[in-house]
Amino acid sequence: MTAPAPVVIRLRDLRKNYAAFEAVRGVDLDVRAGEIFGLIGPDGAGKTSIFHILGGVMPATSGEIEVLGLPARDARDSVGYLTQAFSLYVDLTVKENLRYIGALRRVSDAEIESRGDRYLRMFGMAEVPHRLAGQLSGGMKQKLALACALIAEPRILLLDEPTTGVDPVSRRQFWDALVRLSAGGMTILVATPYLDEAERCHRVALMHEGRIRQAGPPAAIRDSLHLRRLEVRAADLGRAEAVLAREPTLSDVQRFGDRLDVMVENAESGRVAVAAALKQAGFPPASIAEASPTLENAFVLLLRRLGGRLEVPDFPSSRAPVSLRDRAEIAGYGMNKRFGSFQAVQDVDIEVHPGEIYGLLGANGAGKTTTIKMLCGLSQPTSGVVELAGERKQLRSRSVRGVVGYMSQKFSLYDDLTVSENLDFFAGVYGVAAPERAAKKRWVIEFAGLTGHQDQLTGSLPGGWKQRVAFGAAILHEPRVLFLDEPTSGVDPLARRVFWRMINYFADRGTAILVTTHYLEEAEQCNRLGFMAGGRMVAEGSPTGVKQAQGGCVCVLGVDSPQRALDALRTAFDPWRMSMFGDHVHVIVDGDGKAEAARIRGILEGAGIALLDLQPQPYSLEDVFLALAARNAGAGP
């Protein structure tokens, strides 16, 4: 039996106070060499404080901290640290950023050059060494920041939410790089709000209110629930959710775009309870299928058991629900957009109807942002027709702006105004009647969890709280049309669930909603999805429909040597088809799953790798996204 790797990070009774506030409350933690260890938890759980302490940025209040057998400050030369905020100089080139950070870390010029070239090749950035960092996409910026953190070749790498706002293709490339670094012996401690990412870690620890509440491999944490998940497809999901939420025998009910997820102790008795409750409420027979719980299911339920709240205050609505009309509230027909000789969007058709949540998905550069700007009247199409809230010509008129809400990822609030001042400003811009303003402001402040802090400068808020205020500002006037650009970027799963309850509330009242997101688990919340690649719409349909349309499946492999298995399979499969999730290998296959499984067995057997288990599972939306992006690469105008 192989001896366990040595412990390289050791914490005992770690505590950190900020004046009277206790951010970290007695944390014990061991992380072993070569391990990818994930810290997950809601905003304010204490994750970033632990990273600051391990990185030698600030001292602990008390406790024992050992990093490679040394105090954290003494181990800094062996630690790389990628913070939440971009740590790049936007007016320096890619190579200049690497040289500057390398010089700070006392790396020789020759080593900076050779290591920099190696990491740029590893991250697919060898073609852009002289591009300014400020001109890179979000995904490329994060990969450059990682290269800078690696330039001193640290033994330990600290990553604090490294892929927030990064598209799924870049995110997969980022994690493939982490797997290779881990296989080479580097220890990686990562915090992430994305629970599908946490599935890739060897072990994870769930933090809540400054303490570690549960730790272990992701599969063990999922299994600790002792629950099963039922996927329920029924008519009128909003009413079905309300009916099932009242059933005491059901542990949790969550609404998605074309189904409900219901957590039950026993699959068979759960089916009976769900079917009986819906029948009693007058529903036609529903489709009920059993599925495995996800790590996000576990996360939310564990936090709820610890007192986490999912309640949403009643919105002080002042307008009647919109009657659901056949006419689309957001529409584009034959949309084209050229910038000089470059055609960013070609022949795109899109419709979003009242009461519908439409997810527009695509990698960076796919044409999403240009499409949204045309749809909301910020940019004129080169050709084609755009209709917004019944208007085709004056999309920026006062009458249209008064019924449209927009939450931008990059700019939604003024950082140098207080929360209260921001809400006053947006209430004025949107024309919210004076008698309604006070009640709606109170609602946003309560929804954001900022009661008593409304006079705090917005720029001082953590990202999750700022997102809640920005969402509240966008819906103060109860718009008929709502554009949400990555509304929950960086928001923890419990808060994300609350966001989507409000998004569904407005959809149920007839608002037409267009959402963009890079988090594909979240895209499951949409009623319909459109995938863009190379400026074109390459797929459209319900979440279930687009997955079923791909054919094939994902083979989940348990092997005795995961990295060797990946290397062997790369000789026969496209790189995008494979990824590591903890100690399992995932392979996306087309066509007949049994034939592809036999092919995989033969490859592994020929390489002398023991296949311990092979389980087919359906495509996730991330798998669909990767497949569509790969198959349509170079398909632009």
Image (cartoon, grey):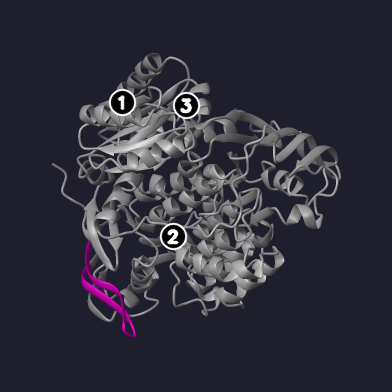
Q: How many C-alpha atoms fall within 10 Å of the one at disc 1: few (<14), some, or many (≥20)?
A: few
Question: Between 242 and 500, which is closer to the camera in this rendering?
Answer: 242
Q: Which mark is residue 1?
A: none
Whether residue 87 can be seen here:
no
Q: Amino acid at mark 3?
A: Phe
Mark 3 = which residue?
Answer: 573
Which of the image's four quarters has the C terminus?
Answer: top right
Residue 378 in magenta? no
For the residue labelled by badge 3, is the local secondary structure a helix, a strand or a loop?
loop
Which of the image's four quarters has the N terminus?
Answer: top left
Q: Amino acid at mark 2?
A: Pro
The magenta region covers 11-29
Q: Earlier in the sequence, mark 3 or mark 2?
A: 2
Q: Which quadrant of the view contains residue 566?
A: top left
Image position, residue 478 (x, y; %): 61, 55
Image position, residue 514 (x, y; %): 62, 44
Mark 1 = which residue?
Answer: 615
Q: Which quadrant of the view contains residue 46?
A: bottom left
Q: How many C-alpha atoms fall within 10 Å of the one at disc 2: few (<14), some, or many (≥20)?
A: few
Q: Earlier in the sequence, mark 1 or mark 2?
A: 2
The residues bearing labels 1 and 2 have C-alpha atoms spaced at a distance of 43 Å
The extreme left residue here reads 1
**Residue at image coords 23%, 59%:** 213
Is residue 48 shown left or right of residue 371? left
Q: Earlier in the sequence, mark 1 or mark 3?
A: 3
Is residue 620 shown left or right of residue 53? right
The extreme bottom residue here reads 19
Mark 2 = which residue?
Answer: 313
